[in-house]
Image (tube, helix red, strand yellow):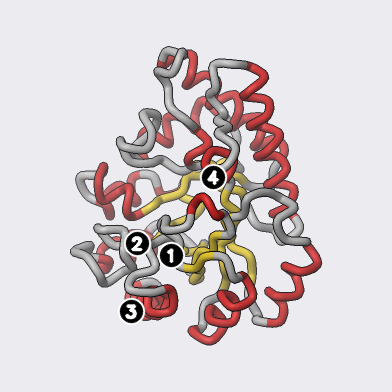
Amino acid sequence: MKSAVTISLVSEARGGPFVFHDDLPAACRTAKELGFDAVELFAPGPNAVAVSDLKAVLGDNGLSLAAVGTGAGWVKHKLTLTNADAGGRRKAMDFVKSMIDFGANFNAPAIIGSMQGRWGDGTDKATATGHLAESLAELGGHAAALIYEPLNRYETNFATRLEEGVELLKRVGRENVKLLADLFHMNIEEVNLADALKATGRHVGHVHLADSNRRPAGSGHTDFAPIAAALKEIGYAGYVSAEAFPYPDSKAAAKATIQAFRKHFA
Protein backbone atom coordinates (compact mmCIF):
# COMPACT_ATOMS: atom_id res chain seq x y z
CA MET A 1 0.00 0.00 0.00
CA LYS A 2 1.08 3.56 -0.74
CA SER A 3 0.51 6.77 1.20
CA ALA A 4 -1.17 9.92 -0.08
CA VAL A 5 -2.49 13.17 1.34
CA THR A 6 -5.23 15.49 0.05
CA ILE A 7 -4.79 19.03 -1.25
CA SER A 8 -7.82 21.23 -1.99
CA LEU A 9 -7.62 24.23 -4.30
CA VAL A 10 -11.37 24.90 -4.15
CA SER A 11 -12.15 28.08 -2.22
CA GLU A 12 -15.73 26.94 -1.58
CA ALA A 13 -14.35 23.85 0.22
CA ARG A 14 -12.07 25.77 2.57
CA GLY A 15 -12.55 24.32 6.03
CA GLY A 16 -13.57 20.96 4.56
CA PRO A 17 -11.91 17.58 5.19
CA PHE A 18 -8.71 18.15 3.24
CA VAL A 19 -5.34 18.10 4.94
CA PHE A 20 -3.90 20.92 2.83
CA HIS A 21 -5.63 23.91 1.28
CA ASP A 22 -4.64 26.40 -1.42
CA ASP A 23 -0.82 26.38 -1.60
CA LEU A 24 0.03 23.46 -3.90
CA PRO A 25 3.84 23.88 -3.98
CA ALA A 26 4.08 24.27 -0.19
CA ALA A 27 1.82 21.26 0.38
CA CYS A 28 3.93 19.13 -1.94
CA ARG A 29 7.12 20.19 -0.19
CA THR A 30 5.63 19.19 3.16
CA ALA A 31 4.39 15.88 1.74
CA LYS A 32 7.89 15.14 0.51
CA GLU A 33 9.45 16.17 3.83
CA LEU A 34 7.16 13.79 5.73
CA GLY A 35 7.68 10.91 3.32
CA PHE A 36 4.35 10.59 1.47
CA ASP A 37 4.28 8.72 -1.82
CA ALA A 38 1.65 10.89 -3.50
CA VAL A 39 -0.92 13.65 -3.23
CA GLU A 40 -4.61 13.61 -4.13
CA LEU A 41 -5.87 16.81 -5.75
CA PHE A 42 -9.27 18.46 -5.32
CA ALA A 43 -9.31 21.21 -7.95
CA PRO A 44 -12.05 23.61 -9.13
CA GLY A 45 -11.63 22.36 -12.69
CA PRO A 46 -9.18 20.88 -15.20
CA ASN A 47 -7.59 24.26 -15.92
CA ALA A 48 -6.90 25.25 -12.33
CA VAL A 49 -3.32 23.97 -12.61
CA ALA A 50 -1.41 23.60 -15.86
CA VAL A 51 -0.41 19.99 -16.51
CA SER A 52 3.20 21.06 -17.03
CA ASP A 53 3.25 22.97 -13.74
CA LEU A 54 1.79 20.05 -11.81
CA LYS A 55 4.25 17.63 -13.40
CA ALA A 56 7.07 19.93 -12.37
CA VAL A 57 6.01 20.32 -8.74
CA LEU A 58 5.33 16.60 -8.38
CA GLY A 59 8.65 15.73 -10.01
CA ASP A 60 10.59 18.19 -7.87
CA ASN A 61 9.22 16.48 -4.78
CA GLY A 62 9.31 12.87 -5.94
CA LEU A 63 5.54 12.52 -5.66
CA SER A 64 2.85 10.83 -7.76
CA LEU A 65 -0.74 11.96 -8.25
CA ALA A 66 -2.93 9.39 -6.52
CA ALA A 67 -6.31 10.61 -7.77
CA VAL A 68 -8.29 13.70 -8.72
CA GLY A 69 -11.55 14.67 -7.06
CA THR A 70 -14.56 15.87 -9.03
CA GLY A 71 -16.51 17.30 -6.10
CA ALA A 72 -16.04 20.87 -7.28
CA GLY A 73 -18.59 20.02 -9.94
CA TRP A 74 -21.14 20.02 -7.12
CA VAL A 75 -19.57 22.38 -4.57
CA LYS A 76 -18.74 25.09 -7.11
CA HIS A 77 -21.06 24.50 -10.07
CA LYS A 78 -24.00 22.57 -8.51
CA LEU A 79 -23.78 19.79 -11.11
CA THR A 80 -24.85 16.21 -10.42
CA LEU A 81 -24.97 13.04 -12.48
CA THR A 82 -28.56 12.42 -11.38
CA ASN A 83 -30.09 15.79 -12.19
CA ALA A 84 -33.70 15.35 -13.31
CA ASP A 85 -32.88 17.52 -16.34
CA ALA A 86 -31.01 15.73 -19.14
CA GLY A 87 -29.11 18.89 -20.02
CA GLY A 88 -27.95 19.25 -16.44
CA ARG A 89 -26.76 15.65 -16.39
CA ARG A 90 -24.83 16.22 -19.62
CA LYS A 91 -23.08 19.27 -18.14
CA ALA A 92 -22.12 17.14 -15.15
CA MET A 93 -20.81 14.39 -17.43
CA ASP A 94 -18.76 16.87 -19.42
CA PHE A 95 -17.21 18.25 -16.24
CA VAL A 96 -16.27 14.79 -14.98
CA LYS A 97 -14.85 13.83 -18.37
CA SER A 98 -12.67 16.94 -18.31
CA MET A 99 -11.33 15.88 -14.89
CA ILE A 100 -10.77 12.33 -16.15
CA ASP A 101 -8.74 13.74 -19.03
CA PHE A 102 -6.73 15.93 -16.65
CA GLY A 103 -5.95 13.01 -14.35
CA ALA A 104 -5.02 10.79 -17.30
CA ASN A 105 -1.89 12.89 -17.79
CA PHE A 106 -0.69 11.38 -14.50
CA ASN A 107 -2.36 7.94 -14.69
CA ALA A 108 -4.58 9.17 -11.84
CA PRO A 109 -8.22 8.07 -11.65
CA ALA A 110 -11.10 10.48 -11.04
CA ILE A 111 -13.29 10.07 -7.97
CA ILE A 112 -17.09 10.38 -8.12
CA GLY A 113 -18.37 11.38 -4.69
CA SER A 114 -20.66 14.34 -4.13
CA MET A 115 -21.42 14.64 -7.85
CA GLN A 116 -23.58 11.54 -7.61
CA GLY A 117 -26.25 13.75 -6.07
CA ARG A 118 -29.43 12.44 -4.42
CA TRP A 119 -32.72 11.00 -5.54
CA GLY A 120 -35.92 12.72 -4.50
CA ASP A 121 -35.33 16.16 -5.97
CA GLY A 122 -37.85 15.72 -8.76
CA THR A 123 -36.68 12.16 -9.50
CA ASP A 124 -37.77 8.89 -7.91
CA LYS A 125 -35.21 6.40 -6.61
CA ALA A 126 -35.40 3.92 -9.50
CA THR A 127 -35.06 6.61 -12.17
CA ALA A 128 -32.23 8.41 -10.38
CA THR A 129 -30.35 5.16 -9.74
CA GLY A 130 -30.68 4.38 -13.44
CA HIS A 131 -29.23 7.80 -14.29
CA LEU A 132 -26.31 7.18 -11.93
CA ALA A 133 -25.55 3.71 -13.29
CA GLU A 134 -25.74 4.94 -16.89
CA SER A 135 -23.49 7.89 -16.09
CA LEU A 136 -20.88 5.71 -14.39
CA ALA A 137 -20.95 3.28 -17.32
CA GLU A 138 -20.35 6.08 -19.84
CA LEU A 139 -17.65 7.66 -17.69
CA GLY A 140 -16.04 4.27 -17.18
CA GLY A 141 -15.87 3.93 -20.93
CA HIS A 142 -14.04 7.26 -21.09
CA ALA A 143 -11.53 6.44 -18.35
CA ALA A 144 -8.78 3.94 -17.77
CA ALA A 145 -9.99 3.76 -14.17
CA LEU A 146 -12.83 5.42 -12.29
CA ILE A 147 -13.56 5.46 -8.56
CA TYR A 148 -17.10 5.59 -7.12
CA GLU A 149 -17.47 6.61 -3.48
CA PRO A 150 -20.32 5.44 -1.22
CA LEU A 151 -21.04 8.32 1.17
CA ASN A 152 -22.80 8.40 4.52
CA ARG A 153 -26.55 8.86 4.84
CA TYR A 154 -26.22 12.61 5.47
CA GLU A 155 -24.49 13.18 2.13
CA THR A 156 -26.31 10.81 -0.24
CA ASN A 157 -29.27 8.45 -0.37
CA PHE A 158 -27.72 6.17 -2.98
CA ALA A 159 -25.09 3.65 -1.82
CA THR A 160 -24.01 4.28 1.75
CA ARG A 161 -22.29 0.92 2.41
CA LEU A 162 -19.70 -0.91 0.35
CA GLU A 163 -22.09 -3.79 -0.37
CA GLU A 164 -24.60 -1.34 -1.81
CA GLY A 165 -21.80 0.11 -3.89
CA VAL A 166 -21.06 -3.34 -5.31
CA GLU A 167 -24.72 -3.74 -6.28
CA LEU A 168 -24.53 -0.45 -8.16
CA LEU A 169 -21.31 -1.50 -9.89
CA LYS A 170 -23.04 -4.67 -11.09
CA ARG A 171 -25.50 -2.44 -12.94
CA VAL A 172 -22.62 -0.35 -14.33
CA GLY A 173 -20.97 -3.46 -15.74
CA ARG A 174 -17.43 -2.12 -16.11
CA GLU A 175 -14.50 -3.77 -14.35
CA ASN A 176 -12.48 -0.55 -14.37
CA VAL A 177 -15.03 1.21 -12.13
CA LYS A 178 -14.05 0.53 -8.53
CA LEU A 179 -15.16 1.56 -5.06
CA LEU A 180 -13.63 4.11 -2.73
CA ALA A 181 -13.60 2.82 0.83
CA ASP A 182 -13.73 5.99 2.94
CA LEU A 183 -13.12 5.03 6.55
CA PHE A 184 -15.03 8.04 7.91
CA HIS A 185 -18.20 7.23 5.96
CA MET A 186 -17.76 3.54 6.75
CA ASN A 187 -17.50 4.31 10.46
CA ILE A 188 -21.03 5.73 10.27
CA GLU A 189 -22.62 3.12 8.02
CA GLU A 190 -20.84 -0.24 8.36
CA VAL A 191 -21.37 -2.70 11.22
CA ASN A 192 -17.73 -3.80 11.01
CA LEU A 193 -15.25 -1.98 8.78
CA ALA A 194 -12.81 -4.88 8.38
CA ASP A 195 -15.59 -7.33 7.50
CA ALA A 196 -17.03 -4.91 4.93
CA LEU A 197 -13.64 -4.63 3.24
CA LYS A 198 -13.15 -8.39 3.17
CA ALA A 199 -16.64 -8.91 1.73
CA THR A 200 -16.10 -6.46 -1.14
CA GLY A 201 -12.34 -6.78 -1.58
CA ARG A 202 -11.87 -7.07 -5.33
CA HIS A 203 -14.03 -4.01 -5.90
CA VAL A 204 -11.98 -1.69 -3.66
CA GLY A 205 -9.84 0.65 -5.74
CA HIS A 206 -8.99 3.50 -3.36
CA VAL A 207 -9.05 4.17 0.40
CA HIS A 208 -9.59 7.42 2.29
CA LEU A 209 -8.00 7.55 5.72
CA ALA A 210 -9.58 9.51 8.55
CA ASP A 211 -10.54 8.79 12.13
CA SER A 212 -14.07 8.44 13.48
CA ASN A 213 -14.41 12.21 13.93
CA ARG A 214 -12.90 12.97 10.50
CA ARG A 215 -9.78 14.27 12.13
CA PRO A 216 -6.43 12.64 11.25
CA ALA A 217 -5.88 8.99 12.14
CA GLY A 218 -5.13 8.71 15.84
CA SER A 219 -7.46 11.58 16.82
CA GLY A 220 -10.61 9.49 17.32
CA HIS A 221 -11.62 5.99 18.34
CA THR A 222 -11.20 3.98 15.10
CA ASP A 223 -9.11 0.82 15.52
CA PHE A 224 -6.99 0.76 12.38
CA ALA A 225 -5.20 -2.54 13.03
CA PRO A 226 -8.04 -4.84 11.85
CA ILE A 227 -8.77 -2.51 8.93
CA ALA A 228 -5.17 -2.69 7.77
CA ALA A 229 -5.17 -6.45 8.26
CA ALA A 230 -8.31 -6.75 6.11
CA LEU A 231 -6.74 -4.66 3.33
CA LYS A 232 -3.66 -6.88 3.40
CA GLU A 233 -5.87 -9.99 3.34
CA ILE A 234 -7.68 -8.84 0.19
CA GLY A 235 -4.36 -7.96 -1.45
CA TYR A 236 -5.05 -4.26 -1.68
CA ALA A 237 -2.01 -2.46 -3.11
CA GLY A 238 -3.43 0.97 -3.88
CA TYR A 239 -3.33 4.30 -2.09
CA VAL A 240 -4.37 5.01 1.46
CA SER A 241 -5.05 8.72 1.14
CA ALA A 242 -5.67 11.08 4.05
CA GLU A 243 -8.95 12.94 3.60
CA ALA A 244 -9.29 14.54 7.01
CA PHE A 245 -9.67 17.92 8.67
CA PRO A 246 -6.40 19.84 9.06
CA TYR A 247 -6.46 19.40 12.83
CA PRO A 248 -4.88 21.09 14.68
CA ASP A 249 -3.19 22.38 11.52
CA SER A 250 -2.21 20.99 8.14
CA LYS A 251 1.35 19.94 8.95
CA ALA A 252 0.38 18.32 12.25
CA ALA A 253 -2.46 16.47 10.52
CA ALA A 254 -0.15 15.24 7.78
CA LYS A 255 2.46 14.14 10.34
CA ALA A 256 -0.12 12.21 12.37
CA THR A 257 -1.36 10.58 9.17
CA ILE A 258 2.02 9.36 7.97
CA GLN A 259 2.79 8.00 11.44
CA ALA A 260 -0.48 6.05 11.44
CA PHE A 261 0.16 4.83 7.90
CA ARG A 262 3.60 3.53 8.81
CA LYS A 263 2.30 1.89 11.97
CA HIS A 264 -0.64 0.08 10.37
CA PHE A 265 -0.62 0.07 6.57
CA ALA A 266 2.96 0.17 5.27
N-term-proximal mark, 3 vs 2: 2
Q: Can residue 14 be seen in this snapshot?
A: yes
Amino acid type at mark 3: Lys
> Mark 2–mark 1 contact, CB under 8 Å?
yes
N-term-proximal mark, 3 vs 4: 4
Amino acid type at mark 2: Ala
Residue 234 image point, x, y percent: 40, 57
Determine the residue located farthest toward the right in the rendered image: 52
Q: CA distance from mark 2 to mark 1?
A: 6 Å
**Residue density around tag 4, few if under 14, some if 14–19, many if 20 or more, within 10 Å:** many
Identify the secondary structure beneath mark 1.
strand
Q: Quadrant of the C terminus?
A: bottom left
> Mark 3–mark 2 contact, CB under 8 Å?
no
Residue 80 image point, x, y percent: 55, 30
Residue that mark 3 sits on: 263
Amino acid type at mark 4: Gly
Amino acid type at mark 1: Ala
**Residue density around tag 1, few if under 14, some if 14–19, many if 20 or more, within 10 Å:** many
Q: CA distance from mark 2 to mark 4?
A: 18 Å
> Mark 1–mark 3 contact, CB under 8 Å?
no
Residue that mark 4 sits on: 71
Indicate which disc residue 210 carries: 2
Residue that mark 1 sits on: 242
Q: CA distance from mark 1 to mark 4?
A: 16 Å
